[in-house]
Image: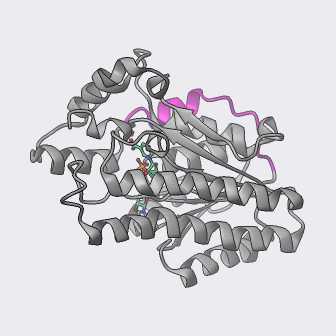
């Protein structure tokens, strides 16, 4: 199980610096975006980068304090926090309605909120069905709900929008993550391909992004549970990820994933739909890491 944790990633210390260094090209000027899981990790980096590039963003999350403080740091003319539990249909419907109410349209729906679950070890025989249900509820149902209400609003307004989902390199590899997580991320890929095929006729593009390990709170919780050591540090986690799933010598950061989201959400990705954009430094393409 030594490779189990490697597909999850993102520590936030370099976030501000990375964001300041990013090219603020206004590629999302005039666009309205919702980012679920926007209070932390990959979502937070994406909120910052999208705002930096001219978008107005609704930060949707269950973490009120972090989401509110990020919104107030960025300013309410460009970022508003909205509490939303993505597993609740009424919450997701209200979230999309809120974006329309505030800013009149929805251009980009970034379904990014996700959980890793409590199953730490690869173990089919010991599969915890309750954990499987919960992980599917957040990671799959949550993203399906985001697609459902975002696409309704886009079609209704005639917006040629973009829907993005954060999957994982576990969307294409079976032996790296806890089973419920692997199942959920494979399902997201199916969802994205089906939605891309359906929504293309409305000019709506649908893509997913599949990172390998990024040291975020999601990954740290996993390391703490998995290694049973509450004092395990982000630096140790980073070293682990870099040692086991990094062919490049460069540590993957939340901002690396946000840049991919910016590409897909902007006109740069105008002809890209149904794609699973894997961002893992070549890890999944190489057997080398699995030996
Ligand atoms: P994170 O824990 O920093 O952020 C996830 C956010 O989602 C949190 O703010 C959390 O409050 C929110 N969230 C969880 N359940 C929610 C719900 N029911 N409703 C609304 N919000 C909810 O973790 P992250 O690493 O930034 O994860 C973001 C996405 O990236 C997830 O889908 C995750 O599976 C995926 N991912 C992460 C890694 C990694 O190594 N960190 C790797 C591949 C994919």
Q: Is residue 201 visible?
A: yes
Q: Residue at x 46, y 62 (%)?
A: 139
Residue 166: x %, y % from top left = 54, 50
Q: Is residue 26 left or right of residue 234?
A: right
Residue 259: x %, y % from top left = 61, 35
Q: Quadrant of residue 161?
A: bottom right
Foreground: 217 or 175?
A: 175
Instruction: State how the image is colored.
Output: one colour
Q: Quadrant of residue 188?
A: bottom right
Q: Is residue 65 left or right of residue 47?
A: left
Magenta residue span:
10-29
Q: Main secondary structure of the magenta part?
A: loop
Which image quarter is the C terminus in? Answer: top left
Q: Is residue 74 visible?
A: no
Q: Residue at x 43, y 39 (%)?
A: 173
- Does the stretch in magenta take in 18? yes
Residue 272: x %, y % from top left = 77, 40
Q: Is residue 111 left or right of residue 120?
A: right
Which image quarter is the N terminus in? Answer: top left
Does residue 281 sit above or below 93 in this rendering?
A: above
Q: Residue at x 64, y 55 (%)?
A: 192
Q: Which quarter of the frame holds ligand 1?
A: bottom left
Q: Residue furthest front?
A: 125
Foreground: 256 or 131?
A: 131
Q: Is residue 121 left or right of residue 55?
A: left
Residue 172: x %, y % from top left = 49, 41
User: How many marks are shown on the rendered structure?
Assistant: 0
Q: Residue at x 48, y 36 (%)?
A: 16
């Amino acid at each position: 199980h030594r490779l189990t944790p490697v597909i999850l990633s993102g520590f936030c210390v370099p976030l501000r610096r990375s964001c300041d260094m990013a090219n603020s090209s206004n590629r999302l000027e005039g666009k309205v975006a919702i980012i679920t899981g926007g209070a932390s990790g990959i979502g937070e980096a994406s909120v910052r980068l999208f705002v930096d590039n001219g978008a107005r963003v609704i930060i949707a999350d269950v973490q009120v304090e972090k989401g509110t403080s990020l919104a107030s740091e960025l300013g309410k003319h460009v970022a508003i926090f909205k509490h939303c539990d993505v597993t609740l249909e009424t919450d997701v419907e209200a979230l999309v309605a809120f974006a329309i109410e505030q800013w009149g349209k929805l251009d980009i729906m970034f379904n990014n909120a996700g959980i890793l679950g409590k199953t730490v070890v690869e173990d089919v025989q010991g599969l915890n069905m309750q954990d499987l249900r919960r992980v599917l509820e957040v990671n799959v149902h949550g993203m399906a709900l985001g697609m459902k209400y975002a696409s309704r609003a886009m079609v209704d307004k005639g917006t040629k929008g973009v829907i993005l989902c954060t999957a994982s390199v576990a969307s294409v590899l079976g032996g790296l993550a806890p089973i419920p997580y692997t199942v959920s991320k494979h399902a997201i890929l199916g969802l994205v391909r089906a939605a891309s095929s359906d929504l293309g006729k409305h000019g709506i593009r649908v893509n997913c992004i599949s990172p390998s390990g990024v040291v975020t709170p999601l990954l740290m919780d996993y390391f703490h549970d998995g290694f049973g050591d509450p004092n395990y540090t982000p630096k140790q986690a980073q070293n682990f990820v870099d040692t086991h799933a990094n062919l490049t010598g460069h540590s993957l950061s939340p901002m690396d994933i946000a840049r991919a989201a910016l590409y897909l959400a902007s006109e740069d990705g105008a002809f890209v739909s149904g794609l699973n954009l894997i961002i893992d430094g070549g890890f999944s393409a190489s057997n080398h890491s699995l030996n």
